Amino acid sequence: MSVDPWSVYSGNALAALSHISNNDCSFPLARTLEVTFVSTRDNEQNVTVSQDIEANISAFVQRIRQLAPRLNMIKMSGGPDPMERVDVTYLYFGSLTTQLVQFTSRIDISYGFGRAFHFLNADAIRNLTYLASRFELGGEQTVQLIRQNAPTLQYLHVAYRCVNISGIIQDADGSYVEYPHLQTLEVNRGYDSRTPLRYKFDGAVPFPGLRRLVCVNEYPFGDALVLFRGNAATLEFLQLTMTRELAIALPQSSIFTATSHPKLRCVILKLHPSMMPVNYIDDPEIIQFMMDIAPDAAVRKISKWCVNQLPPRLLSLFGKHTSLQVLDLPDLRLSIWNAMTLIQSLPLLSDIHAAAPTLDPMPDGATARNVVAYVTSNYSPMGTRFRCWHFGCDFSRRMKDKVKPFLLLVLACPNFDYAAAVDYEREKFVKLLEKTIGMVAYKKHAPRLQRLLFGGWTNSFLHSPNSTRGSGNGSSQPN
């Protein structure tokens, strides 16, 4: 809901809610309240400091609690305009927001809230289990709020541009802060041209039970290596924004060793935009890091942006992850022959997210005329778990050139039944499938090939890009 703080201060907001009876408008099952603060000059003029503003704020918040007694999460965005009256804004906006969040255990502060967060009475907010601060970390109120809720937090999202994150790891007296129940940590560090302070935090293990770590840190990495300390036995999901420098820094820190992360099941490595359009996946440092990050071959999902080639070393990397179930490389361009080699080496692979495969270059012995017989003789059956290939739009290739490789894949993989084109290309793709299946070379296999026409529709939910089927613990929340 949209809330004008000035209407709360004046009592007008309470008056509007008071006309609604609990029977007419109540939300007994509501768990989340989304509030956008939008100030209007008209209401501002109606507020004087002589009014009992604190009483109006308390009564308004109490009325919200009556209408939605089971709220346990509040999402706030917006905030005071810097041009508003300081006498009221600084005195009372913090009171309003603090009282709103006091009866919840989960807070999400969105972009646009900005400086308003500094008005919170952080000392009055305790026992949070979920805290997302989606703007600059730096104000003492923000740091204090995070630290004092360390004993109960289970989810923490921190965005910051300051030199280091020592504030949430060390108290003012220098003692270390531990987050014993934190399971998900998302750290988003913006670019800072200053050299980061290289804190070592000797002996600090701030996140001992961490299961999911999303680290969007622009290099230099600074003190953030401490995020990995002490949670090797529990970490299941890791998402990193990669630079070549980071690929060098992490191995040097000995964070990932041969048996260090036995539960790690999902690894998502993304290139930072500053590295594009160069295809750094060919860089030996990054390839080596990817080979070292989970050498026990337990990873079930590997995801990476802007990989458009598959160097031999990287192909061997994927081949050794025999438990891999999802390969999510949207920009990857594979020939159907490399794809089938990959599927052969990954017995549990069920989903590929990549560009539509190509027929060329043809292997020795295969020609345009005998390609169907070549596949049925040399590749069938294989990849019994493989079922789905998601591919995006590629205007550099004709649609009819995308169809035949998928039909060959059906012949090779007995359970492959879904080539997932983007929505606006799906109809054209299906029509070309029907036409190609009627061609002489494919016609005798028509009953089998027609699965590609219909299987995808019945299994579209299972194979949707947001599905976690076969992906271990799923992917990151809002990238």
Image (cartoon, rainbow, N blue to C red):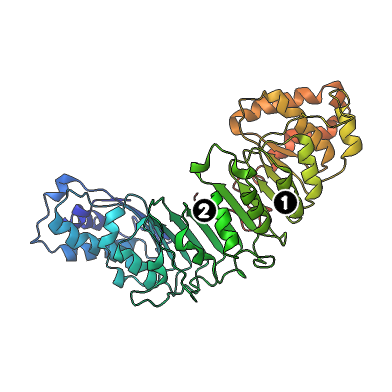
Relative to residue 162, is residue 363 depicted above or below?
above
Q: Is residue 59 visible?
A: no
Residue occupying image coordinates x 53% and y 67%: 183
**Residue situated furthest left in the rendering:** 50
- Residue 341 at x, y percent in the picture: 80, 43
Relative to residue 289, is residue 156 depicted above or below?
below
Q: Image quarter for residue 429?
A: top right
Mark 1 surroundings within 10 Å by alpha-carbon count, few (fewer than 14), some (14 through 19), many (20 or more)? some
Q: Is residue 64 left or right of residue 272?
A: left
Mark 2 surroundings within 10 Å by alpha-carbon count, few (fewer than 14), some (14 through 19), many (20 or more)? few
SS for callout 2: loop
How far, Cα to Cα, is label 1 from label 2? 26 Å
Q: What residue type is labelled 1?
A: Leu
**Which one is nearer the viewer's eye here, 202 or 49?**
202
Residue 23's disc is none
Q: Is residue 75 visible?
A: yes
Q: What residue type is labelled 2?
A: Gln
- Residue 89 at x, y percent in the picture: 18, 57
- Residue 368 at x, y percent in the picture: 84, 23
- Residue 455 at x, y percent in the picture: 74, 39
**Which one is nearer the viewer's eye here, 97 or 325?**
325
Q: Find out whether the residues at labels 1 and 2 contact each other: C-beta distance under 8 Å.
A: no
Residue occupying image coordinates x 62% and y 44%: 281
SS for callout 1: helix
Relative to residue 188, is residue 463 depicted above or below?
above
Q: Which of marks 1 and 2 is nearer the N terminus?
A: 1
Relative to residue 97, is residue 383 depicted above or below?
above
Q: Is residue 346 left or right of residue 147?
A: right
Q: Name the residue under label 2.
A: 477
Q: Mark 1 points at which residue?
A: 317
Which tag is nearer the camera, tag 1 or tag 2? 1
